[in-house]
Image (cartoon, rainbow, N blue to C red):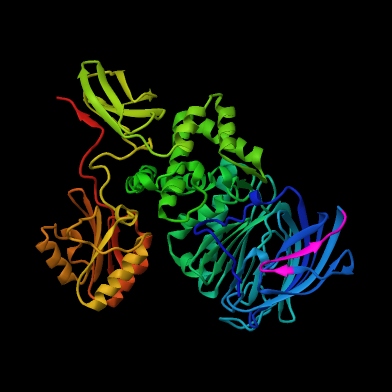
Amino acid sequence: MRIWGTIFAVWGVLLWSAASFAADTAHHVAKVHIDPAKPGLLVNATVELKGGGATDFRLSTAMTLDTVTLNGKPVSPLRRKGVFTIDLGANASHTVALTYQGTGEPFLGLEGGFVDNDWLAHPEGRLATWSIEGQIPTTPKADDEDTGDKNVGGQKFIVPGKLMFETTSDGHYRAGYQNFNASAPPVLITGPFQIGEKILKSDQGDVRIRTYFHKELAGLSDTYLEDTARYIAYYIGKIGPYPYPGFAVISGPAPVGWGLPGMTYMGRRVLALPFIRFTSLPHEVLHNWWGNAVEVDYATGNWAEGLTTYQADHAMAERMRAGGGREKRLEWLRNYAALPSERDQPLTEFRAKTHDASQVVGYGKTAFVFHMLKQKLGEAVFDKAIQRFNRDNHMGIAGWKDVRTAFEAESGQELGSFFYAWVEKSGAPVLKIRDAKATEREITLTVEQDQRGTPYPLHLPISVETAKGTERHVVKMNKKRQHFTIATKTKAQALRLDPDLDVFRRLGPGEAPPILRDVTLDSDAKLVTLGSMEMRAYARELAGRLLQARLRMQDPADPAKSVIIAGPKAFVREHLDRSGLLPPPKAIADQGDARAWTARNGEQTLLIVEAENAEGFAALTRVLPHYKRRSFVVMELGKTVDKGTWNPTGEALTVKFD
């Protein structure tokens, strides 16, 4: 029985896009009775719409239609999987009234439920507005006794929209929600929630901020409320008015993170992690502007994930620590350095994070493109362009051409070559310095773009070290090979091209130490298993989780570019010694009871994994997919005790003068 539907996102905005709907809208008035103990739903709804002829309505196959009327007269719709059809007759305004119900797991449960938006019968090809009232028994519950107080446990339900009322009486929680901004139909979320609330005052009106948390998370409510209010206020200043009546942070039983209009739904274990408030939370708050209030024209490429990554992940890294922005950009460049060229794609082809390679491009590179726009135009113009883009496309659908239009309008510059090179083309420049010389008051150098194809338009920052300090310069490059002369105040001792990593490019030798993604993104990576048959089976399971390709065993006669070596510690160390490979770095060699690290062996990249028992392999199998941007991970008793990235081994794009 299909209940959950197809949910195509992890840590992002759910892809129920208005781009798939026509301009006309259907309005829903619904009353829903929810019973998480049964579990089941009973829905009494009317749909008001305009149109005529055979019209398809989308409805979950978990739902059984009881009655259907068209303009007050009973009808018998034709039903097939996930859809039923009603002949509306003449082209006019119509009212369809329905009662239907559904039962079964994992639809709902005492620990919480997330019901896909096809629980609400909706005509295909249209946007939706709604007024939804519902009730749910506060008992039985998963974790505490009913008190009749909405703030102390008991089952609750939430749908996107403005909360119009809520009461708790006679053993039931009741609430009503309205939404008159045409959008995709709403999901429905339930759980044994304790509610926390804060009202944020803004020039556009009050914003109701809430937490719907399971009992064990209730102590975190105040900090989540304060942080959410702070992020919303920050983005109001950066972008424009908050687009919804409120924002809710909702805990769920599954380890997920989804953004929805006016809310985010996260796993209860995820919410308990201390770093989530500073990483995922601002990202999900910002999705209310990008991806929800301004929806994505997916046919022309998804700009929203990259812009959200830049204005949330990158911005928070800059605000939290000195050099944090550079660290984030280095992470994106390291990830891209690990991406095989055959898996690269233009930004116009990115739709969603369907695999690790798409994330490298759609999140990291897209974010970097917005960073280069800021560097090129300046922060003041960048902010104004973002605000214009938001105003011009509010509650509409936007593509890359709309992004370009806003930036051209605010900057007064023609940006066609920039957007063609960075959005419509795949790849990145490979920069090299030639013939650099320094005199008493001048530097001359030639910069080459050594990649195949046409040159990228670049604003290249150059830092010049002198006895009197550092001088900063910027040169414009639009050729494959270009000569520059830079005046200096005194004789240069050294120069560095792109010292702060402000240009999206292929990292040079020594700039990109090996990370897990060097192996996991390689479709031809091979596996070497060591130890007993049982331990080899654990190693294959781990490699299967990491690799997004068919698992292949290493053939000694045909060495691969990327290899995973996995087994018990003694077997791994013996194999490394016998094969003439480097032993583990001293810093981690004896740490923990399970570890993984990367290493270079000439042109080959190795991922070495060792654990003493099934529990160690299980722990690494669980966590390593989340640490692909790292060079090493160490675990002890199932917990991560150390992780990091190897330091670069050299300085590319640096010249030291005698």
Residue 603 or 405: which is nearer the viewer? 603
Residue 123 or 46: which is nearer the viewer? 123
Q: Residue at x 10, y 58 (%)?
A: 580
- Range of magenta residues: 79-90
- Is residue 271 visible in the rendered image? The answer is yes
Q: In which quarter of the image is the C terminus?
A: top left
In this picture, is 401 found above or below 541? above
Residue 42 or 521: which is nearer the viewer? 521
Residue 410 image-quadrant placement: top right
In this picture, is 649 found above or below 195? above
Tell which residue pokes out farthest to the right in this image: 72
Tell which residue pokes out farthest to the front in this image: 557
Q: Quadrant of the N terminus?
A: bottom right
Residue 167 image-quadrant placement: bottom right
Q: Where residue 176 appears, x then y in whole percent?
A: 74, 66
- Is residue 34 visible in the rendered image? The answer is no
In this picture, is 317 found above or below 266? above
Q: Residue at x 56, y 41 (%)?
A: 238
Q: In this view, does 383 lie to the left or right of 557?
A: right
Q: Which residue is drawn at 26% across and 42% down?
A: 511
Residue 173 image-quadrant placement: bottom right
